[in-house]
Image (cartoon, rainbow, N blue to C red):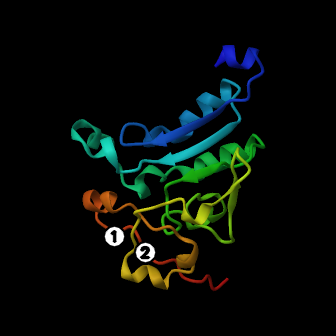
Amino acid sequence: IDNLRRKRINITTTIGLNSLNWMYFPEIVRFFFEKGIKNYMFFALKYQGRMNEGGSKKLAVRLSQAFSRINEVRNFLAEKKIKFPSILHTPPCILPDYIDYLDNCYTKPSTMLLQDGDTFDMNKAHRDLVFKNSCRKCVYYKGCSGFDPEYAKIFGTSEFKPVKVSSS
């Protein structure tokens, strides 16, 4: 980190939350902040490929548990005047207060400009994700990419509940 900073290379750290570190989420962000890092991405595990093999399953953690300290992180970043980062692989029903930061929920059309000049429709970036029947009642259903079916095999689907229109 120090070497990269001396060379004035902009550092972004991706923090993947798992069963071994979720409880230290704010402390991990503070650690990297103290090292001078001000750009972050927060990452929920994807339950595909090697993640489904042997010992890797020990890293599995419920999304609601993994992000249970996110408000502390938001408060810390706000106090330090750091822009809140993207959150990857997390449906809006898990973090409805963070809808603007979720990578797999689109409230408006989203495209990415590729190096070769082509564009990529981000709404089609997440494949093989699924929905519960009740998801159709969610206010974010049209823009949601769904949830990982392999995650559901481990933890079930009880966390995934439709977000209702706010009455306030």
Task: Give the image location of residue 29, x and y in percent.
Answer: 59, 36
Q: Secondary structure at mark 2?
A: loop
The image quadrant of residue 51 is: top left
User: What kind of residue is marked 1?
Assistant: Ser
* Quarter of the image with the N terminus in it: top right
Task: Give the image location of residue 165, x and y in percent.
Answer: 59, 83
Q: Secondary structure at mark 1?
A: loop
Image mark count = 2
Say whether residue 125 is left or right of residue 84.
Answer: left
Say whether residue 128 is left or right of residue 100.
Answer: left
Q: Which residue is mark 2?
A: 161
Mark 1: give few (<14), some (14-19) or many (20+) Cα within 10 Å: few
Residue placed most toward the observer, 44 or 122: 122
Dots 2, 1 in contact, CB < 8 A = yes
Q: Is residue 147 above or below residue 87?
A: below
Q: Is residue 79 above or below residue 134?
A: above
User: What kind of residue is marked 2?
Assistant: Lys
The residue at the point 56 percent across, 40 percent down is 26
Q: Which residue is mark 1?
A: 158
Mark 2: give few (<14), some (14-19) or many (20+) Cα within 10 Å: some
Residue placed most toward the observer, 36 or 137: 137
Task: Give the image location of residue 100, x and y in percent.
Answer: 66, 62
Query: In this view, which residue lies farthest toward the left?
Result: 54
